[in-house]
Amino acid sequence: MRILALIPARGGSKRLPGKNVRMLGPKPLVVWSVEAARNVPEICDILVSTDDPTIAAVCKEAGALVPWLRPAELATDTAGSVGVALHALDWYEATNGVVDGLLLLQPTSPFRTAETVRKGIALFEGNGQVPVVGVSAAAAHPMWTFRLESGYLTPFIPGSGLETRSQDLPAAYAVNGSFYLLSPKTLRENKSFFGPQISALIVDSDIEALDIDTALDWVIAEAIIQRGLSSTGN
């Protein structure tokens, strides 16, 4: 099986300027994801899609493939991940031959382990290449959430049983952003990382599931490293 790992790393970031090359512990943030994919046998290449020459240089030094800078239309705040993925996939297959899967590894999930990556690939292969998405237990259960209607709280799920004890609630999961794997055919047909069926790569570790989006998330990530709680093994 040939899997292309894609790390999208745009230069612009309003909440955390320069975050992809900002040092998180001993290495830049984006390098954590490069190293998570480096020694996985099924991964034929680790391609970084970026519009930033500094990010490109850092990733090349880390051993990633950075064959070009991303086109300007795919480097805006509104550019979606699907367009970025299709651009990278089309170039790679035209240049290096077809792949069985595209693995999207967001650099904002630095603590995902190589073991988890291998587990997700095995799930993809074993389930007939149904898309695999990384999920974790939902922080807020959907049966206990609300929307506002005319200024009043209304349950998102009518009649869901707000009095149900937490231990009696069915398991609920949320996408954590750490892992997306699907076939090129599914991506091209659906223009989405999700297909009609989705396999769940359940990430039980809150540390692995951390998605760095805010300054507080960064503080948490630094604390994880300082206390030796990361078990990336990359």
Image (tube, grey):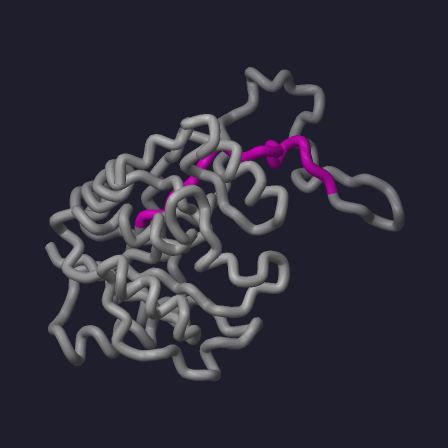
Is residue 123 part of the magenta span, yes or no? no
Magenta residues span 132-146
- Of the 4 image quadrants, the one containing the N terminus is bottom left
Give the x, y percent position of residue 221: 50, 39
The vertical placement of 89 against 22, above or below, is below
The one of 86 and 220 positioned closer to us in this rendering: 220
The answer to whether residue 228 of the structure is visible from this angle is yes
Give the x, y percent position of residue 161: 67, 26
- Of the 4 image quadrants, the one containing the C terminus is top left
Is residue 139 part of the magenta span, yes or no? yes
Res. 95 image quadrant:
bottom left
Residue at x 48% of width, y 76% of height = 75
Residue at x 60% of width, y 19% of height = 166
Residue at x 54% of width, y 69% of height = 12
- The count of marks equals 0
Give the x, y percent position of residue 17: 58, 62
